[in-house]
Amino acid sequence: MAPKVHGSVFSTATMRAFATLHEKGVEFEVVPIDMRAGEHKKEPFISLNPFGQVPAYEDGDLKLFESRAITRHIALEHHGKGTELIYNDVKKMTSVSVWMEVEAHHFDPVTSKLVWEQVVKPMMMSMESDSAIVEENQKKLGQVLDVYEARLLKSKYLGGDGFTLADLHHLPTMHYLMGTSTKEVFESRPHVSAWAKDIMARPAWKKTVEMQKQA
């Protein structure tokens, strides 16, 4: 049976799981969760993720939540198929792991706030974004991307010479922010800009974005 991803095609966390499955060439079933109706906060979804957050993942008897744990499982489970998103080599994988942590603890907290203010509030909730919060977090993002610029001066991708989960995890929030003024924060740093264009042009990511158009 094909694995199931319970979530929304518009959710950044769910998009990480979709992109990983596309990179590995794994067929999967999407179980839509209507977040506006609060389906993620009640049964049957809450049995899959007790924290009431998308996505949840089912693969036979295995049930998982937390998007980054899901992507790592997919990469391990389907090792040798599609894009190798992790390494067996300890030294190489250590570098990938560092940048996966950087994304989770430095990049995502800032970009998620910007997505909320610049995309979710105005486009999905008919609310005005808070310009002060946007300005504050664009400054914070710039500081994070200065570190990325230095890294990408030495390496094509964050984890090394090949595309890995360390890069993939950035795609969902980056995708939304490229349609906002925050795009300039990426484009003003040449190596970050080249990296962003590279990973957003991947066929697996284009398939993930296309899912939104079909929803």
Image (cartoon, helix red, strand yellow):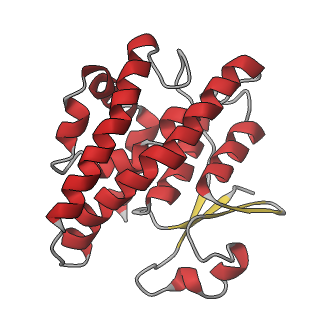
Q: Pick the quarter of the image with the N terminus.
A: bottom right
Q: Give the residue displayed 15% in from the left and 63% down from the top.
A: 131
Q: Give the residue displayed 34% in from the left and 45% down from the top.
A: 174
- Tell me if I can see residue 137 in this picture: yes
Quarter where residue 2 is shown: bottom right
How far across and down, in percent of the image, does residue 75 sit?
68, 38
How far across and down, in percent of the image, does residue 97 sit?
64, 33
Left or right, 110 with reference to 64: left
* Relative to 103, residue 203 above or below: above
Left or right, 160 with reference to 139: right
* Relative to 168, residue 45 above or below: below
Q: How many discs mark residues in the rendered view?
A: 0
* Relative to 49, residue 180 above or below: above
Residue closer to the observer: 153 or 123: 153
Quarter where residue 46 is shown: bottom right
Left or right, 48 with reference to 191: right
- Tell me if I can see residue 118 in this picture: no
Which residue ends up furthest to the top in the rendered image? Answer: 154
* Relative to 111, residue 76 above or below: above
Residue closer to the observer: 172 or 31: 172
Q: Give the residue displayed 61% in from the left and 36% down from the top.
A: 24
Left or right, 200 with reference to 59: left
Q: Pick the quarter of the image with the C terminus.
A: bottom left
How far across and down, in percent of the image, does residue 66 sit?
63, 59
Q: Give the residue displayed 58% in from the left and 41% down from the top.
A: 101
Residue closer to the observer: 33 or 210: 33
How far across and down, in percent of the image, does residue 139 sit?
25, 45
